[in-house]
Image: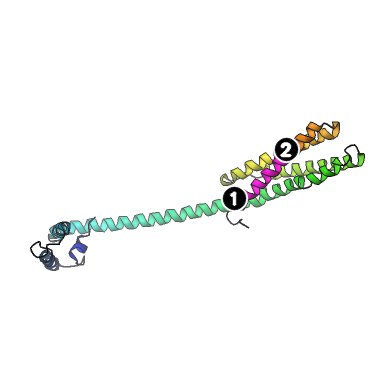
Amino acid sequence: MSDHYATLGVSPSASQQEIKLAYRQLAKQYHPDRNAKAGHERIIAINAAYEVLGNAEERRRYDALRGSSRQSATERTVAAQDHYRQQRRRQGDRDEAVERWLKRVYEPTQAAIGKILRPFRAELTALAADPYDDALMAAFESYIERSRQYQAQAERYLQSEPAPAMAGAIARLLFQCLNQTSDALDELERYCLGYNDDCLRDGREMMRIAQRLRQELQAIVRQQPGRSH
C-alpha cells in the first residue's frame, strides 16, 4: 500500500488544512511550468495522495486500511519469529537426541568393534609364522572366541535403542560393519578347522571392509554438531 502521508510529507496526525497546504506547495514545486525535470510519476503520486487524504471520508477509509496493513505485517513478523524459534528448538531437540544415541549406542558399539579389528593383523601375523603350530593356532582360536564375545556385545548395544532419524545412516553403517565382522569370524573359524586358504582369504577381506566402514563411521560422526574434535 502506498504511503500517501510520506508522499505529501505530512504526519498521519496532520489536519486537513495541513494536508491541503502541503499539497499546494508540492504541486507548485513539481509543476511542469516551474520544474521541467520533475518526474511525471512523482506528480501523479502527489495528486493520488491528495485525492485520498484531501477527502475526509476517503482519508478515514485509507487510515483504517493502513492500520490493518501495519497490523498484518506485524502479525506476519511475529509469526515468522515464532516459526524460527520453533525450528531452532526442534533442531536443538534433534541434535540432543542424536548426541544421546551416539553416547549410549554408537560409542560402545564402536568400542566393541575396535576390540575385534585392532588386534586382527597382529594375531594373523603371529599365526602365519606356523599355522600348524598347536600353540599358535590355539592363540588364534582364542582371539576368535574373544572376538565373538565382542561381536555379541556390539550387537546388543546396537539393538538396545532405535536410532533417531538423523542418525539413520550411522546406524546402517554400524549394521554393515557388524555383518562383515560376523562373517569374517565365521570364515576364520572355518580356516582353523580345515586350513582352507579360501576361508582365510575371505575372512581377511571381510575384516578389511569392516575396517573401512569403521573409518567411514568415525569420519561421519566427527561432522556431527559438537564433535569436530
Badge 1 is on which residue? 98
Q: Residue at x 32, y 56 (%)?
A: 73
| Mark number, residue 206 | 2
In this view, the residue in front, 18 or 133, is: 133
Q: Is residue 52 above or below residue 155?
A: below
Density class for disc 1 (Cα within 10 Å; few <14, some 14-19, many ≥20) is many
Q: Quadrant of residue 206?
A: top right
- Farthest right residue in view: 134
Q: Quadrant of residue 210?
A: top right
Q: Quadrant of the C terminus?
A: bottom right
Density class for disc 2 (Cα within 10 Å; few <14, some 14-19, many ≥20) is many
Residue 179 coordinates in the image, percent (x, y): 70, 37
In this view, the residue in front, 94 or 199, is: 199
Residue 193 coordinates in the image, percent (x, y): 85, 32
Residue 83 coordinates in the image, percent (x, y): 43, 53
Q: Is residue 224 above or below residue 8?
A: above
Residues shaded magenta: 205-229
